[in-house]
């Protein structure tokens, strides 16, 4: 696999447009704010926040912004992937998806972009690994079926609760009370479905929010840490580096 480039595109007031033509690479993108319009093979699609699209190389498409509606999206352009690895994605002109683990996928896209821009030692291997993980997540969601299992449904409830309350001091008991299960049960099921604990997921959501704030506001690292529920900035720095791979100060450096 060769990653040609990774883009964080922000259109404040519309006016963005891609003329009709074939894609030169495979494209995977995720909209994190607003919506964009795509026309593919004569079909019009509106891709909104929390939704994404995969287009294989050669897809004939055009796209535009919605006038007056700002949007933000991550996009990865890549090529030289063995056919058998992309086979599940190549039976249609595109694959639309709404990931069950949107916040985690957004965090991985954000890290992919940061690694690509920073080009630190080993970035090539790291970016390829992240992109393959993301493609695996999308494939899992596409072929898992439209109706989630009872355990996945329970985990989705917990994820939604965490997303609404991640700035608070959450405990496992809060999740257990919310879904009316025991703390041991919710911890076990959450890890079986997502391969991580509820607390780890909460930190991932927090750090994804921190990276957005670092890239889009003038808030200091200390202000962001406090806003996201970290009473100790040293601990916030530790969690940020553990999840992202470098301290928040490095993210700020990339933005300057």
Image: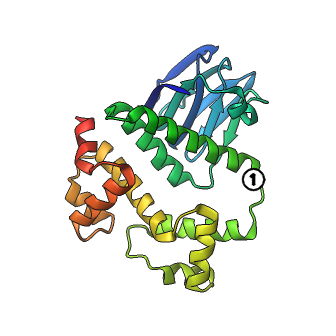
Q: Is residue 248 left or right of residue 6?
A: left
Image quadrant holding the C terminus, namely top left
How many numbered circles are shown?
A: 1
Residue 70 visible to the viewer:
no
Residue 19's quadrant in the figure? top right
195 or 25: which is nearer to us?
Answer: 195
Residue 209 higher or lower than 75, as above or below: below
Q: Residue at x 28, y 60 (%)?
A: 238
State whether residue 171 is above or below residue 80.
Answer: below
Nearest to the observer: residue 226 or residue 197 = 197
The picture places residue 35, in percent across and down from the top left corner, at: 55, 38
Q: Position of residue 196 (x, y in %)?
A: 53, 64
Residue 83 sits in quarter? top right
Secondary structure beneath label 1:
loop
Residue 231's spot in the image, x, y percent? 25, 71
**In the foreground, 50 or 121:** 121
Q: Place residue 194 in its image quadrant.
A: bottom right
> Badge 1: few (under 14), some or many (20 or more) residues near its Cα, within 10 Å?
few
At 47% from the left and 34% from the top, the residue drawn is: 68
Q: Residue at x 48, y 24 (%)?
A: 16
Eyeballing the image, is 221 above or below 1? below
Q: Nearer the viewer, residue 128 or 66?
A: 128
Q: Which residue is mark 1?
A: 144
């Amino acid at each position: 696999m060769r990653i040609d480039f990774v883009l964080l595109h922000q259109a404040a007031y519309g006016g963005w447009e891609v003329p009709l033509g074939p894609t030169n690479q495979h494209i995977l993108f995720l909209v994190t704010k607003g919506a964009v319009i795509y026309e593919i093979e004569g079909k019009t699609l509106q891709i909104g926040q929390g939704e994404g699209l995969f287009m294989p190389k050669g897809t004939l498409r055009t796209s535009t912004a919605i006038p007056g509606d700002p949007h933000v999206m991550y996009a990865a352009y890549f090529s030289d992937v063995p056919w058998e690895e992309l086979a599940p994605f190549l039976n249609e002109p595109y694959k639309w998806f709404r990931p069950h683990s949107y916040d985690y996928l957004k965090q991985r896209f954000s890290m992919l972009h940061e690694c690509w821009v920073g080009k630190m030692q080993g970035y090539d291997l790291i970016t390829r690994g992240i992109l393959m993980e993301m493609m695996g997540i999308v494939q899992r969601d596409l072929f898992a079926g439209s109706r989630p299992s009872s355990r996945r449904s329970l985990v989705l409830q917990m994820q939604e609760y965490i997303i609404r309350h991640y700035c608070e001091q959450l405990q496992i008991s809060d999740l257990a009370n919310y879904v009316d299960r025991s703390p041991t049960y919710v911890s076990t099921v959450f890890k079986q479905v997502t391969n991580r604990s509820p607390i780890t997921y909460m930190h991932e959501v927090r750090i994804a929010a921190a990276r957005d704030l670092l890239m889009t506001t003038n808030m200091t690292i200390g202000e962001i840490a406090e806003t996201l529920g970290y009473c100790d900035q040293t601990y916030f720095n530790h969690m940020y580096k553990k999840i992202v791979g470098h301290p928040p100060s490095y993210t700020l450096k990339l933005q300057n």
